[in-house]
Structure formats: C-alpha cells, structure tokens
Image (cartoon, helix red, strand yellow):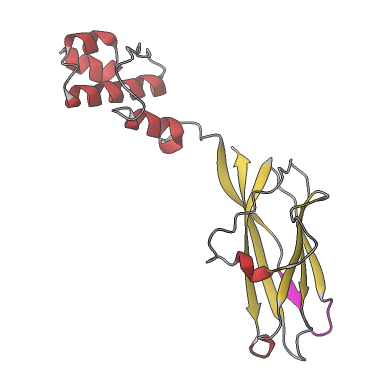
Amino acid sequence: MADLLGMLYGDDSGDDSGDDNSEGSEMGDDLGDLLGDLLGGRRKRGRGRKTAGSKNWLRDYAKGGGAIGVPPSAYQEYPLGFDAAVFTPAGPQAITLQATPQLACKPMRPVIIVLRSAGALAVGVNLNDVKVGQRSQFISAAPIAAETYAPTSFGVMLAGSPAGPGIIVSLFYSTTIAPPAGEQVTVQSAIICHAAA
C-alpha cells in the first residue's frame, strides 16, 4: 500500500515505508512525482539520494517538453523562409531576398538549394552577405559559394546575431555569369533559427 501511495502521489509517506533500494519503487516514485507536478499535486521533498543521471529520466524528459501540456524548453528551432531568387538572361544578376521573423530569434543555419536548367550548369551562384538588420554576418567582403550551405553540407552553422521581431534578415545573391539565352537559375533559401518559445 505504501508503494502504491508513492506511485500515485510521489509522497514521502510511500517512500519512507517502501523499499528505497528497489528499482521498481524508484520508478513508481518518479512516475508519482511527474503526475504530481503535472496535476498540481504535492512535490516530493528531495533527500539528496538521487543524482541527475539516475532514475529521474521520466520527469526530466517531461519537463524538457516531451510530454503533452508541459511548456517547451528555452528555445525551439523554426525555419525562416524566403522567396525564390530567379536569375534569367535579361534579369538582374544580383538579387536581395528579405524575410521578417515574428518571434525573437537567432539565425543558425542557412539552407540553400540552387536549381539550374540544363544549359546553365556553368553558372555559379554566390552568397555575398547575410545581414540581420544592418549587421553583416560575414567577417570579410569576399563572397561564398551559395552551395556551401546546401542541405547536405556538414559543419556550416552560422550562429548569427539575434533578431528581434520585425527585424529584417537579408540574403544577398549574385551569379558569376549571366545564364545563356533561354536558361535560368533558381535559388531557394531558408534559415533555421533558434527562437524563444
């Protein structure tokens, strides 16, 4: 009965009367503590017996946003999308794309896909700058090949400056040469951001 009370309420009455060395009892304690936290019940008085890596995985998982009804962790990852940039023979060879986040966020990882028509395979696309507001996220004026940030690229985090709601995030693109007649190059972009939830 004591263990049952511990399982349901996470109360010390069940802990003290039950077998503290039983893994099943500790699992029941953790489940009871979790239910007590979520349902507004009594909180367990810690005795310093358990460590962060012991039997508290269920409660830690839930408090980290893994359970329905539990607030999320300090931030979540959201995509910040941009319109497509389309380079044509008669169009401009430099295009600026802009997006305005609605949450305070920190740009972390650009994702860029370059699509070329069959006759435009020799056309290179450069990412000349990324700006958060007026602040450049590059440390030099030299351009970077846009495909540096391809979806399959590894180890290319940006970790940019924080952007408040309404701050414009800009991507500056250009081509190395104009596409041949009848051809085009399309650039699709997004930035994965850490945003306060």
Nearest to the observer: residue 163 or residue 32 = 163
Would you say residue 90 sits in the magenta stretch? yes
Q: Which residues are magenta?
A: 84-92
**Residue plotted at (71% across, 64% down):** 83
Q: Position of residue 32 (x, y in %)?
A: 29, 21
Q: Main secondary structure of the magenta part?
A: loop
Would you say residue 97 sits in the magenta stretch? no
Say left or right for 16 vs 33. Answer: left
Q: Image quadrant of residue 174?
A: bottom right
Say left or right for 112 vs 87. Answer: left
Residue 76, placed above or below residue 190: above
Can the viewer see residue 94 in this picture? yes
Q: Position of residue 181 (x, y in %)?
A: 77, 91
Q: Position of residue 66 (x, y in %)?
A: 41, 37
Q: Image quadrant of residue 194?
A: top right
**Residue plotted at (84% across, 84% down):** 90
Residue 16, placed above or below residue 169: above
Residue 85, placed above or below residue 49: below
